[in-house]
Image (cartoon, rainbow, N blue to C red):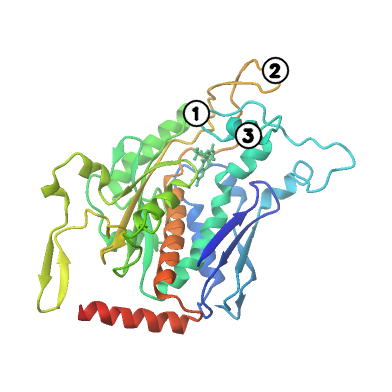
Amino acid sequence: MLRFETAGESHGECLVATVSGLPAGIPISLEAIGRELWRRQQGYGRGGRMKIETDRAEIVAGVRHSHTIGSPVAILVRNKDWQNWTEALAVESAAVEADHRPVTRPRPGHADLAGAIKYNFPDARYILERASARETTARVAAGAVAKALLGQFGIEILSHVISIGDVCLDRHAEWPEIAALGRASSINLGCVDAAAEARMKEVVDEAYRTGDTVGGVFEVVAHGVPPGLGSHVAWDTRLDGRLAQAIVSIQAVKGVEVGFAAAGASSFGSKVQDTIHYDRAERRFTRGANRAGGIEGGITNGQDVVLRGLLKPISTLRKPLASVDLETREPALAAYERSDVCVVWAAGVVAEAMTALILAQAFLEKFGGDSLDETRRNFESYLKQVQDF
Ligand SMILES: Cc1cc2nc3c(=O)[nH]c(=O)nc-3n(C[C@H](O)[C@H](O)[C@H](O)COP(=O)(O)O)c2cc1C
């Protein structure tokens, strides 16, 4: 079973990701992980923190001579900002009582108040340190390892921005343009259409100007996915449900669509289902469209897996909203700490990582293997079965 976990606080010494259950022999490159970390830091609307951190992965376990060896892979990403927080977030009690930079004015929409009440802290510092999406750096590092596995089988996962505020990409994006954007060496806002991107940037600029923030929607596409991952047999084996949890677990993502879910809900069945056809020359089934997003009955059907994440505007506002001071219980404006204004592109990159991890999990459930060679043999024998079907 492929499992992954992250640890680390936003201003702590480092972030850590572990990925276990991988076969031995997957080629792993620090450069490829670094590229994913770099992609997460891009996107029009990011805040000052991204200027401080240039994330670099260090692999401390599970990889030898550029290949997995079957043991858990552990990846570490150091926080450059840690040097400013060594006392405030010291692991051991300081001899002198350190200022641990309390946050007593919880931000509406953030984890501050709910977390402080639950963990019984007088302020929200330790809550926001972990709730912060800095944690997603570790997810992206783990996801890069999952992408390395899937890449061996021709599966690639990328994303793009389809709306910011009320400005939407008003056409379908094709895989080649999503791939070109995903592989590009510079990223602006992350929309495949220049005219739509220009309008989206105006919305971000307006949020900057007014001390506000703005959300939007990203789309993740997994290309080259074989039919047969996931299963209809039980609620927790259905792949759409597993992917939905993974996407909504991303900070500030409040909704997910599998395929064209929202448009489908307001349409008729005859307009929504993807018709089935058969190509006798190629001896394979084809589909009239991909509105299902590549999953039917919780099982991949061989079309691209398409997921959309709906991101709320982030909650740290330069023009803060009403809150209450936890010490005095008096009305107060919410705390402001250096913050992003728009993170839709970055959230899409995190969603790619989460999609890669869940697909890799489902892939290994189906094909198993302690070594990559064994996984490949199982995969190829299954592909023959599909061809002969
Ligand atoms: C890539 C990314 C960057 C984020 N940056 C910020 C930020 O700078 N400030 C902020 O208040 N929230 C930010 N968020 C969102 C918060 O982490 C999130 O709203 C918070 O943890 C509460 O969780 P919830 O919104 O899922 O309920 C970011 C989210 C993502 C995905």
**Which of the two residues, 123 or 367, is positioned nearer the viewer here?**
367
Q: Where is residue 90 in the image (x, y as percent from the top left)?
A: 78, 46
Identify which amino acid the numbered label 2 is placed on: Thr
Q: Going 76% across and 41% down the picture, which residue do you hit?
A: 88
Q: Give the residue displayed 45% in from the left and 83% down from the top.
A: 374
As drawn, the residue found furthest toward the front would be: 233
* Label 1, label 2: how far apart the Cα atoms are: 26 Å
User: Where does label 3 land, which residue?
Assistant: 118
**Would residue 298 be found to the left or right of residue 331 on screen?**
left
Inter-mark Cα distance, 1 to 3 = 30 Å
In-front residue for pair 278/290: 278
Q: Disc number at residue 192?
A: none
* 10 Å crowding of disc 1: few (<14), some (14-19), many (20+): some
Q: Residue 211 carries which label?
A: 1
Within-10-Å neighbours for mark 3: few <14, some 14–19, many 20+: few
What SS does tag 2 mark? Answer: loop
Q: Which residue sits at x=44%, y=71%?
A: 364
Q: In the rendered view of the protein, which quadrant contains the C terminus?
A: bottom left
Q: Are marks 1 and 3 in contact (CB under 8 Å)?
A: no
Q: Can residue 185 be seen in this view?
A: no
Q: Earlier in the sequence, mark 3 or mark 2?
A: 3
Reading the image, the residue beneath label 2 is 328
- Distance in Å between CA atoms under marks 3 and 2: 19 Å
Callout in the foreground (1, 3): 3
Earlier residue among tags 1 and 2: 1
Coordinates of residue 301 in the picture (x, y in percent): 26, 64
Q: In this view, does 124 lie above or below 225?
A: above
The answer to whether 59 appears left or right of 44 in the picture is right
